[in-house]
Image (tube, grey):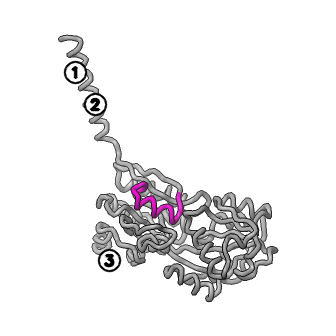
Amino acid sequence: MTHRYRSALLAAALAAGLLAGCSGQSEKLKLATGPQGGTWYPLGGALKNVIEMQLGDVSVQVLPGGGIANVMAVDSGKADIALANSVSTVDAINGQPPFDAKATRVCNVATLYPQYFQVVTLADAGIDTPTDLKGKALATQPKGNTGEAMTAHLLQAYGLGYDDLSRVNYGSYTDSVGMMKDGNAQVFTLGTAIPAGAVMDLASARTIKLLDIPDDGLMQMKTLNPGYQRIVIPAGTYPEQTRDVATIGYATHIIVRCDLADRFVTGVLDGVHGSLGDLASVAKAIDKATARSMAEDIGVPMHPAAARWYADKGAG
C-alpha cells in the first residue's frame, strides 16, 4: 500500500468520523428574549430548560432582545423562537410603524400573560399627569423595545415628543434605575409584568409614584395601535402604592418562524403547558395560564402545528 493510498484512506476515515459525529449533534434553536433586568431574560432561561428537556436532542441559545426587535429577528430568520408583545407583533403583521413592511414569516404559538406599560416617576418630581412630562428627564429602553415605542405613543397622545423633554436616555433597565436613583432622570418607562424587579429595586432606594394614563390618553393611543387595552396595576403592587393605577396592557406571547418544523412547535407547547408552575416561579402571571388562554386569538396567525395541538386539547 503506497503512502499516498494510505493517506487517502486516512482522510476518508476521518471525514466519515466527522460526519458521524455531526449526525449525533443536537439541533440548535435561537430564542430571543428581553433586556437584562426585565422578566423576559430569566423567563428565556427557564424556557430554554423546558424546551431542551422536552425535546432532548435540541440545544437552545438564549439571546437578549426586545418586543419589536424580536419580531424582526424571527421574520428575518435570525431567531427561531422569541418572546413578543401582542401589540408589536400585530403592527408587524400589518406593516404599520415602526415596521417598514409586513412581517410574513411570523406565527403565534402561545399567549402567556398580560403585560403592563408602567410610567414610574420620582415622588418629588411634580409629575401628576402625562402633560407634566414636558421638560422632564426620561429613562426608557433602546429603540426596538415595545416599552420605548409605547412611550413615544404616550407623548404623541398628549401633543408631545422626545424633543419636549430635557433629556432622554435609551438604555437598559439597570441603567434607567441607576439614573433615577441618582436623580439624573425623573421618569422611567417600561413594559413588563408586575411587579417588575427593576421598579422594586428603584423603590428600595427612592420614593416613587406610578402615573395614571387617563381614558383620553388611552383613546388617543388606540388610534396609533388598536391593540392597546385598559389594565390596572393593583394597589400594593409596589411599596407605598396605596391605590390602583390605570394604565395600558397587552399580552406577552411566544412566536416562531412559520416554517419551523412541527415537532419543535409541538415540543415547545408540550414543555410549556407541562411546566406552567415552574415558569410561574419566574413570571408569576403565568400561573393563571391554561391551554385555552394560551390559544387566545390576538390577531397573529397561529402556526399550523400549534393549531392542531390546541384542537387536540379541546382549546382550539
Query: For mark 2, what is the residue?
Result: 17
The span picked out in magenta is: 65-79
Q: Secondary structure at mark 2?
A: helix
Cα–Cα span, label 2 and label 1? 12 Å
Residue mark closest to the camera, 1 vs 3:
1
Query: For mark 1, what is the residue?
Result: 9
At a point 45% along the width and 56% down the height, the residue shown is 31
Q: Disc 2 marks which amino acid?
A: Gly
Q: Is residue 255 in view from this perspective?
A: yes
On whether residue 70 falls in the magenta region, the answer is yes
On whether residue 179 falls in the magenta region, the answer is no
Name the residue nearer the viewer: 116 or 267: 116
* Image quarter hosting the C terminus: bottom left
Rendered image: mark on residue 225: none
Q: Earlier in the sequence, mark 1 or mark 3?
A: 1
Q: Disc 3 marks which amino acid?
A: Gly
Cα–Cα span, label 1 and label 3? 57 Å
Give residue 155's position: percent from left, percent from top: 65, 77
At a point 56% along the width and 65% down the height, the residue shown is 145
Q: Is residue 189 above or below residue 25?
A: below
Is disc 1 in contact with disc 3, using a CB cutoff of under 8 Å? no
Q: Earlier in the sequence, mark 2 or mark 3?
A: 2
At a point 53% along the width and 83% down the height, the residue shown is 223
Q: Main secondary structure of the magenta part?
A: helix
Quarter assignment of residue 315 = bottom left
Give residue 49's position: percent from left, percent from top: 45, 54
Q: Earlier in the sequence, mark 2 or mark 1?
A: 1
| Circle 2 crowding by C-alpha within 10 Å: few under 14, some 14–19, many from 20 | few
Query: For mark 3, what is the residue?
Result: 316
